[in-house]
Amino acid sequence: VDLTDATRRKAFDAQDSHEEMLVPVFRNGECVYELPGLDDVRERVRANLAELDSRITRFLYPQTYAVGVEKGLYELRQRLIYEARGVEGDV
C-alpha cells in the first residue's frame, strides 16, 4: 500500500525475491544477533546498490524510489491513528 495514496496498491507473487528487514536482536534479554564485520557490510551495500535501476541512482533527474507497506501493517497503522485521534473510520 502506498502511504501517500491508499488507493495505489501492488500485489507480489510468492516467488518474488524478498528479504526480511526486521531480525531479532534480543530474545528473553539475551543477544541473539551477531554483528557482521565492516567488510561484509560494505559488500552488502555495494551489492544492494548494484541491483537498483539506474534511473533511480542517476544524479541528474533521478526517479523516485517507490516505497509502500504490507497491507496488514497499513491497516494497523490506520487503526492506531484513528484511535489516537478518537475518531472512527474504515481501514
Image (tube, grey):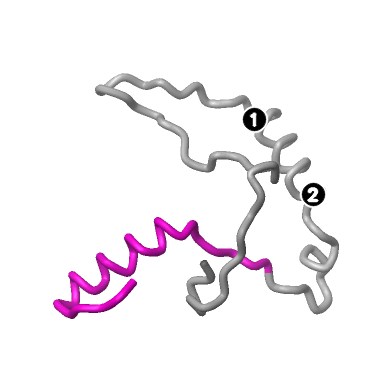
Give the residue at the far left of this rendering: 86
Which residue does the numbered mark 2 point to in the structure image?
Answer: 51
Query: Along the horizontal axis of the image, is 57 left or right of 22?
Result: right
**Quadrant containing the C terminus in the rendered view:** bottom left
Q: Quadrant of residue 41?
A: top right
The amino acid type of the residue labelled 2 equals Glu
Q: Which residue is mark 1?
A: 38
| Mark 1 crowdedness (10 Å alpha carbons): few <14, some 14-19, many ≥20 | few
Do labels 2 and 1 touch, CB within 8 Å? no
Q: Could you tell me which residue is drawn at 63 percent across and 44 percent down?
A: 14
Left or right of 72 on screen, residue 64: right
Magenta stretch? 65-91
Please identify the quarter of the rendering in which residue 73 is found.
bottom left
Q: Residue at x 66, y 50 (%)?
A: 13
Whether 82 is among the magenta residues is: yes
Which comes sooner in the sequence, label 2 or label 1? Answer: 1
Image coordinates of residue 76 in percent, x first then y, are 32, 60
Q: Position of residue 32 (x, y in %)?
A: 41, 21
> In the drawing, does residue 64 fall left or right of residue 87?
right
Rendering coords of residue 65 (x, y %): 68, 67
Judge whether 14 appears above or below 9 on screen: above
Q: Which amino acid lies under the numbered mark 1 shown in the image of this protein?
A: Leu
Q: Residue at x 53, y 42 (%)?
A: 21
